[in-house]
Structure formats: C-alpha cells, structure tokens
Image (cartoon, rainbow, N blue to C red):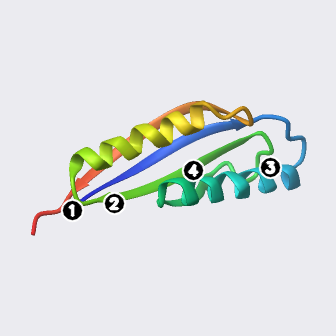
Amino acid sequence: MHAAAIRVELRIRETRTLKQKRSAVKSLIADLRRTFEVSVAEVDHQDLWHRTTLGVAVVAPQAGHLERVIILVERFLDNRDDVELLATAVGHIEMQQ
C-alpha cells in the first residue's frame, strides 16, 4: 500500500469576505473529493479571505497510481479559474506487508 499527503497553497480569486471564501473552499473540497476520491481538509489560513492551504490524502495499491493521482490533482487545481496555485509539497509513505 502506498500513501501520499499533498499540501496545496492557493489564492482564492474573486472573494472579498470570509463567508465567500468558506463557500469557495467548500465547493473546491467537494470537487476534489468527488473527482479523485481523496480525503481533503483545509489545514491553514482559515482566517484569511483570499488564501487557503489544503491537505489532500491519497492511498493507492501501486506507486504508479498514486503518482498519477497526485499529478492529476495538481493539474486540476492549476487549470481552475477560481484559484491560483501558489505552492505544492508532497510527502510519501510506503507500507510493507
């Protein structure tokens, strides 16, 4: 089994209040969960209306599948018009049976 945690820093466009930001982040998290079947949580910048950091967890049986999901998640976020991808960091865990 292989697992990875992706830390994604984003600037949220077109938001001027925390209420707008929370709505945008909630929608973004739902899109990521539905599209890639990953676990997602907001992990930093909860008090800023224009920034967020998301933690995305991925588990896969093969390392190749894990890497494909990581690339697709980054590409998905980079191609969205409502956010700007500022930074990503990936940590891997490999568990032996």
Check residue 54 in the rendering and tell me which mark sits there, or answer none. Answer: 4
Dot 3 or dot 4, earlier in sequence: 3
Residue at the image position 89 percent from the left and 47 percent from the top: 17
Residue closest to the eye, 66 or 9: 66
Instruction: Using residue 2 as the reference point, say whether residue 7 is left or right of it.
Output: right
Mark toward the start of the polypeptide (3 vs 1): 1
The amino acid type found where label 4 is placed reads Leu
- Is the Cβ of the residue at disc 3 closer than 8 Å to that at disc 1? no
Q: Residue furthest left?
A: 97
Say which residue label 3 marks: 21
Residue at numbered disc 1: 1
Q: Is residue 41 above or below residue 85?
A: below
Q: State how far apart marks 4 and 2 are (Cα).
A: 17 Å
Of mark 4 and mark 1, the one earlier in the sequence is: 1
In 3D space, how far apart are the residues under numbered discs 4 and 1 (Cα atoms)?
23 Å
Marks 1 and 2 close (CB-CB < 8 Å): yes
Instruction: State the residue in front, 73 or 86.
Output: 73
x, y percent for residue 97 = 9, 69
Q: Which residue is mark 2?
A: 59
The amino acid pointed to by label 2 is Val
Amino acid marked by disc 1:
Met
